């Protein structure tokens, strides 16, 4: 049998493993931070109408500029952001790939602050960029001083900041983003995949866009918006950045069906986001209850909770799996991560964890 190593694959891909969060048909899928609430039926019905219209025209290529969708996304973000400042692709993963195709690549470095979203380093590798890592402070925080120090030390071409951070849930102060921008000469990308779940008073990097042409803020419809299966991520930045991304995208990369579904769903943004408050409440409940089971949860601004104090993460993962629950072992010794879903899912997760925990 031929193995990967037998192929004339790029040297810098040898020995790498693909992204591989388990996908298993268990009842409680709490491992990839989806919104576990289904799309409301009234939205499904309305999206179907637009999909039917789009299907009637699929003999033609879709609008390469996804104009209506960009207008919808700009309207959703508000803050005076114009459609010319919006980019979108098949998930924010593809958005990040476009960013590194345009601004990273061979001979260029991308700085991240691990532990962080695993795809950041994989997209860096996939685009031939060099992934370099900075140090965080205690409890996974990054202060403005730390960001400045690490950027000055490593002089990256691109900085990836994750706000809040995955897998730890750690908030990122807006002052840190400002400091990172000041300290760097290159692109600063803030990944705000979970922004809608932030606790009240949290400021978005979107507020920093005016006057900062090297600042890029990515978002997604995969999390709060309950639209992961559609694959729609987006970014806001200076219009010149959008022109740069046009150079690397494949023509017609957003299918007519994707554009139609996402545009229709955006018209229902308040309904689509109605579950966010309850999910945040379940997250806060998990954070509040884990200590009584002997675990150490971290503060979270996302729809998941990262917790330490786990003697044997693999054993806990397996014991929960046996109870039909999938959570995430992110490979950090003594820690696990769980997605906050419905009240019923949280009840079952906490009850099951109590049953298998030593105290
Ligand atoms: N950024 C972060 C921090 C994430 O956690 C995820 C999904 N796990 C993504 C981006 C990618 O999301 P998508 O491609 O579905 O938009």
Image: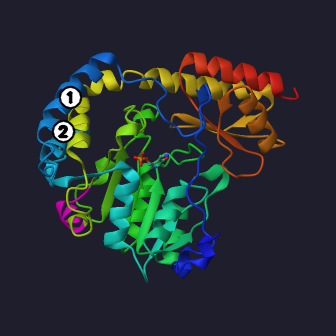
Mark 1 and mark 2: span between their CA atoms?
Answer: 8 Å
| Quadrant housing residue 260 | top left
* 240 drawn magenta: yes
Q: Is residue 322 above or below residue 328?
A: above
- The quarter holding residue 307 reads top right
Q: Does any portion of residue 176 appear in the rendered image? A: yes
Mark 1 or 2, nearer chain start = 2
Is 154 situated left or right of 28 in this image? Answer: left
Question: Which quarter of the rendering shows the N terminus?
Answer: bottom right
- Residue at 25%, 63% in the rendered image: 250
Dots 1, 2 in contact, CB < 8 A: yes
The span shown in magenta is 237-244
Q: Residue reaching furthest bottom? A: 107
User: In front: 211, or 348?
Assistant: 348
Circle 2 is placed at which residue position? 72
Q: Residue 285: within the magenta?
A: no
């Amino acid at each position: 049998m031929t193995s990967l190593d037998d192929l004339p694959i790029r040297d810098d891909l040898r020995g790498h493993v693909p992204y591989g969060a388990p996908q298993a048909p268990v009842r409680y899928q709490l491992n990839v931070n989806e919104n576990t609430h289904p799309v409301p039926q009234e939205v499904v019905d309305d999206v179907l109408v637009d999909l039917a219209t789009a299907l009637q025209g699929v003999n033609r290529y879709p609008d390469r500029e996804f104009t209506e969708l960009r207008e919808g996304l700009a309207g959703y973000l508000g803050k005076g952001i114009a459609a010319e400042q919006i980019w979108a692709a098949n998930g924010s993963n593809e958005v990040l790939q476009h960013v590194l195709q345009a601004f990273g690549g061979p001979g260029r470095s991308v700085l991240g602050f691990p532990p962080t979203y695993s795809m950041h380093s994989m997209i860096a590798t996939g685009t031939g960029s060099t992934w370099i890592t900075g140090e965080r402070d205690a409890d996974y925080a990054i202060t403005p001083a730390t960001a400045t120090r690490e950027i000055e030390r490593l002089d990256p071409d691109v900085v990836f900041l994750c706000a809040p951070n995955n897998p730890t849930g750690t908030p990122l102060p807006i002052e840190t983003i400002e400091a990172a921008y000041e300290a760097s000469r290159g692109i600063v990308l803030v990944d705000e995949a979970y922004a809608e779940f932030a606790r009240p008073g949290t400021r978005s990097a979107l507020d920093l866009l005016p006057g900062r042409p090297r600042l890029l803020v990515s978002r997604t419809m995969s999390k709060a918006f309950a639209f992961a299966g559609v694959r729609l991520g987006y970014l806001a930045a200076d219009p010149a950045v959008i022109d740069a991304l046009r150079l690397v995208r494949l023509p017609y990369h957003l299918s007519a069906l994707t554009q139609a579904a996402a545009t229709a769903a955006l018209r229902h943004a308040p309904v689509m986001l109605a579950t966010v408050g309850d999910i945040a409440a379940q997250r806060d409940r998990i954070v509040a209850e884990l200590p009584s089971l002997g675990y150490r949860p971290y503060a979270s601004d996302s729809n998941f909770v990262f917790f330490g104090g786990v003697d044997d993460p693999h054993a806990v993962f397996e014991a929960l799996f046996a109870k039909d629950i999938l959570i995430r072992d992110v490979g950090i010794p003594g820690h696990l991560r769980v997605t906050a879903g419905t009240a019923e899912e949280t009840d079952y997760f906490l009850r099951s964890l109590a049953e298998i925990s030593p105290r």
